[in-house]
Amino acid sequence: MFGTYQAFYPLWICLASFLYAVEIIRKDHFKETSRNLLLIVKYAIVFITAALMTWVIRCVLTAALRIHETSGYMDAMVGWGKFPVKECLMNIIRYAYRVAFNPDFFRFFGFAAVASAVLFVICFVALIRRHGSYAVLPSLALLITVSSFFLLAVATGSGQVLVRTQLALCPALACFALLFLDLFPGRVPGIAVGVLCAVITLIQWKNTSGLFLSDYFRYNEDIRYTAEIMNRIDEKNDSGILQKDLKLAFVGNHEPESTAIVLKGETLGQSFYHWDVENPYASSERIYSFCQTQGYRFQMPSVEEYSAAQDYAERMNTFPGEDSIAFYGDLVVIRLC
């Protein structure tokens, strides 16, 4: 599981810490301190063993299949040791704010994070009042559960942790809703949780439908935009060079213009012509892959050729204006913006 996606690490910690707390609460093991501490050791051993097995399997498969690792994606996410400690701490705080309060990120995340925090506080107060200092260990476990949304940011100290890694957010909210019902049985708490579930359903329905509808229009706009670019290249290509032999350099980026795009996530609703604009090739690699799916074949320029294309594009107009596509040596330069 850990080898699938890095967000499974905090998800495991979220569920394991909650199960630990629930076992103590449901079986009334509050006063069995030695047993509870030993249980922490067992959970830690399972986690470390699974993480080591994932690393070993990854190394073996990489060597056996002769996979050459070229991506620095994970290394780039780590800020500890690269930046000052103060900057890393500020990155963590900014990330927590983005998840909990920034409406630009799916809108559901903030609601789920705040609702989880409120339920945690209610359950925490109830446990402390009922069991006093004996509730410290399960309360700490629940604190880990509610903070699991931010563990990747804490582990990396980076502002590059993606909001879409919040696999632990919804399970944590569900866990605290169940714990709340267990600690406060009765009709009124049940109705409150029912209302919460109804609100979650409505928010998720609205956001999910908005994301998929937006991405549908974005996808069709990307198709039309690509076809227009390729038609213009064919009109200008009087050299007899086959399309598959052309080197295309897309300079700049282009965002979807459709008014039907009502909501954007980190991937859904994002144009291939605007994705990864901060990379050395800007969006070119994303555009290249997308064009392949549409049946267009061409070559990618080298880093040096792309750099030369960027310099040349400064004297060009932006697409779809005149002179927005130019043949420059072995390159076809497309100025997007």
Image: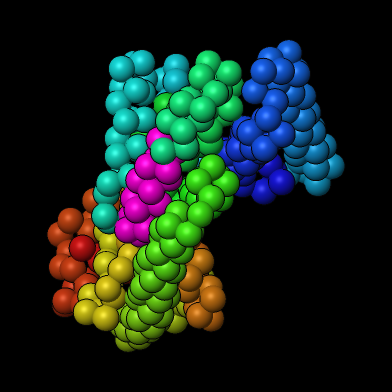
Q: Is residue 212 above or below residue 37?
A: below
Q: Is residue 72 above or below residue 201?
A: above
Q: Is residue 120 visible?
A: yes
Total marks shown come to: 0
Q: Is residue 244 left or right of residue 40?
A: left
Q: Residue at x 68, y 30 (%)?
A: 28
User: Where on the picture, by quarter, is residue 86?
Assistant: top left
Q: Residue at x 29, y 39 (%)?
A: 97
Q: Is residue 295 left or right of residue 5?
A: left
Looking at the picture, the colour scheme in use is rainbow
Q: Is residue 285 left or right of residue 326?
A: right
* View extreme (front): residue: 186
Q: Position of residue 298 (x, y in %)?
A: 49, 70
Q: Residue at x 37, y 58 (%)?
A: 108
Main secondary structure along the magenta-highlighted residues: helix
Magenta residues, as a range? 105-121
Residue 130 or 235: which is nearer the viewer? 130
Quadrant containing the C terminus is bottom left
User: Where on the picture, by quarter, is residue 137?
Assistant: top right
Is residue 228 found inside the magenta-colored segment of the image? no
Q: Position of residue 241 (x, y in %)?
A: 46, 77
Is residue 115 found inside the magenta-colored segment of the image? yes
Q: Is residue 56 above or below residue 311?
A: above
Q: Position of residue 323 (x, y in %)?
A: 19, 73
* View extreme (top): residue: 34
